[in-house]
Image (cartoon, helix red, strand yellow):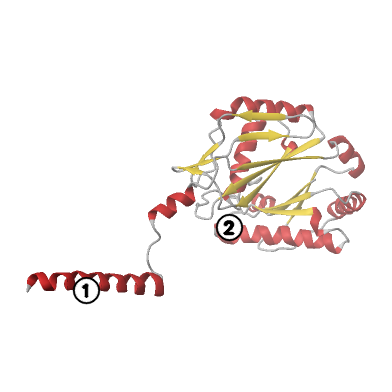
Amino acid sequence: MQKNTLPWLIALTAWIAGSTYWHVCKIKEVCDEPLVKSASSANTLTKPSFDIHNSDGLSLRASGNIKFPQSSETPNVLEVQPQLEQLKDYLAKNPSLQMLLIGRYASDERNNTSFANLGIARAEALKSIILGEKGNPQSIVTDGLLSDSLYFQADTLIGGIDVIFKRVASQSTTTSNLDISPELTLYFPYAKTDFSHSEEIDEKIEKAITYLKAHPNQQVTLTGYTDNKGSDELNLKLSERRAQNVKDFFVRKGLSPDQFKIVPQGKANPQGNNDTEEGRQENRRVVLSF
């Protein structure tokens, strides 16, 4: 009797297991993805190499690369230090060139910096290393980009920086045509998004408008700041709204919105003492960088 029922018990068990799998995994689709698929997906990314080129013959390569700990803006550049020194010399010898550093970050990384995103923070940190104390800060601009196709080795991002070169007018030409400082700063009343006007400021604004209309390819970075009153999140949003209002002002004057880039910084980088009203007034600003 036992021998006759055993095959039926095995068949019944297999049928129950198969029915359960089909109902849970195929119909309700709540099964976990197989580990083999996850490993295969991770292996589809190619480890990036350090490779910087420009059309005038610049060619920098390294066997290693820049590395960032996950959710950190601090770069490890030991493997590319000689190439970064060459890059610094190259920028010094070519003042008509400007380099754009684009820092990348993944959506599951935390931004523990004062910058709008982790990508900008990474680009700014690398900029400081390349320029050192004597480099020209106008030779490098920074930006951030969200990307979920980054190469992580354990908890370390390999690469994560894009480099783009563009030719710009020399500083002397720019200032002589504008007859203003390369940076124009507009100040704001407390908790307001409309900047304060004065005869001196309005004259500088008109000169800037005249120059930008004559040079439609000239890019302007609008960096917004606040004082230290209020939360970090609210200050970041306020600094963005201030920069956006400045952009809207110039667009209403007939300039192209494509000429302006907004960088909100919140209460970061104060230029005045936040313990005094005079200092806080200095910090409520938007800086126009040409």
Tag 1: amino acid: Leu
**Residue 156, horizontal then vertical, whole percent:** 48, 41
For disc 1, the marked residue is: 12
Rendered residue at 93%/50% (across/down):
214
Residue found 80% across the figure and 59% down from its top: 257
- Say which residue appears at 81% left-offset and 42% top-offset: 182
Mark 1 lies on a secondary structure that is helix
Q: Which mark identifies residue 229?
A: 2
Q: Residues within 10 Å of mark 1 (few under 14, many from 20)?
A: few
Indicate which disc, 2 or 1, sits on the residue closer to the N terminus.
Answer: 1
197 over 220 or under it: above or below:
below
Residue 120, image x, y percentages? 62, 47
- Secondary structure beneath dot 2 equals loop
Q: Quadrant of residue 128?
A: top right
C-alpha gap between disc 2 and disc 1: 70 Å
Image check: 134 left or right of 69? right
Residue located 57% across and 29% down the image: 63
